[in-house]
Image (spheres, grey):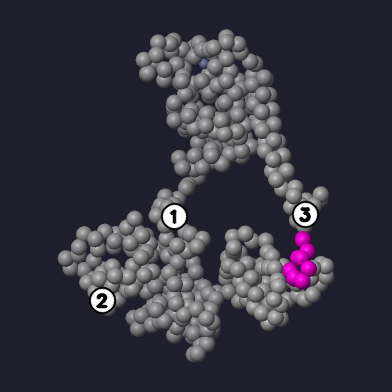
Amino acid sequence: MLGRQMWKLLTCPDSLMARILKARYYPRTSVVRASLGHNPSYVWRSILAAKEVVVQGSRVQVGSGRSISIGKDPWLPDLQDGCVSTNLNEELAAAPVSSLMMPHQRAWDYNAVSDIFNSRDKELILKIPLSSRREDDVWYWMADSRGCYSVRSCYKVLNPITPGSLADVWRKLWNSKVPNKVKNFIWRAAHNVLPTALNLISKRVDVPAMCSVCNAYEETVLHSLVACSFAKSCWTSSSVGFVGYCSNFLDWLAHVFTRCSKDECNTAMMICWRIWVNRNNKVWNNTTSSVCQILNSAGQFLYQWQAAKQQVFDVNDDTHRLVHGALCWEQPKFGWVKCNVDAAVFESQGKIGIGCVIRNSQGGFVAARCVSVAGIFGAREAEALGIREALSWMKELQIPCVIIEMDCLQVF
Ligand SMILES: [Zn+2]
């Protein structure tokens, strides 16, 4: 939440709050370079505590470059470090980025950039595309696709999901392709809330503490699903194998998710569920299944469920696809033309390519155009530039009724 206040100071310098804080704490500099100062208020002290995180996760997009300091603002398109790494003197570090552009043009002064900066900075600067229209230098938040700061995305930046961590275990569990009731069962097992004998006894239910399947050890979740002699036989006969001893079921699950492939993880969850069904049958009906039956029914259930899901997916998709699976191009209605646009990013060459084709209502070719634009863009930005290029071209050709079609849903 404090980060949000800091973000507002960065992006809305004309707001009342920003003007009051600027007048009081950083009258001759920007909030990025502001310090705590003498006798700071509780509010200012709190906002500054979030400054480092917000500034590290943000970059300035170059417009005119007049409000960006060459050596003091993070304006280079580098995820790790957006600041210039070349040693600059104080005067040059404080100079605006606009001084690195050709006079009265929106293009980098190649010679000046080559003379001043080291190869890393030079390469990054020359990759920055310059807009001929945009004047503002805009802050954007890197962890969000729209560039807007949010508490949620900041939390993700501060708590990245590392392989093997608890967050990684839950993410893999909820993303796995197994029936929801099995996911729910595994989640309950990992939280130790299955009605095993020991859990029931802890709730003052009068039941025997021993495992109802082997009758040799006390029944915990780990014992019932993994360590019981019957469960061990299932694991050693399965494609997952027995993955060693752990102190509790959650550790065992984390171990499986780290060590096994996605398919093996799915199988492991199904086997856990089937072992538990077998345990319930033993307790309530006094019937048991063999290891072979457990593995077969777990595999069959998973296969049938995945096949049914695949069928639903295919049926939903059939209306848009031809028999051989390719997407079908549809003609525009009479009097209209259709312009198909696509863009490709050539990252090593530091440019993108845009192609447009116009066809009429009979599907006949009308015109085509291809353009190359210098600069490093993401796929989404490249597609958006493709639309802009297509629209400018339509305007030039003075075509009134046109449908623009592309393969990127995110741009709209
Ligand atoms: Zn047992």
Mark 3 highlights which residue? 326
The CA span between labels 2 and 1 is: 31 Å
Q: Amino acid at mark 3?
A: Ala
The CA span between labels 3 and 1 is: 37 Å
Which quadrant is the N terminus positioned in?
Answer: bottom left
Q: Farthest residue in the bottom direction?
A: 103
Q: Give the mark nearest the N terminus, 2 or 1.
A: 2
- Residue at 53% of width from left, 24% of height from top? 226
Q: Secondary structure at mark 2?
A: loop
Residue 153 tag number: 1
Q: Amino acid at mark 2?
A: Pro
Residue 292, horizontal then vertical, whole percent: 67, 20
Residue 72, horizontal then vertical, whole percent: 37, 74
Q: Amino acid at mark 1?
A: Ser
Q: Secondary structure at mark 3?
A: loop
Q: Circle 2: is it few (<14), some (14-19), or many (20+) Cα within 10 Å?
A: few
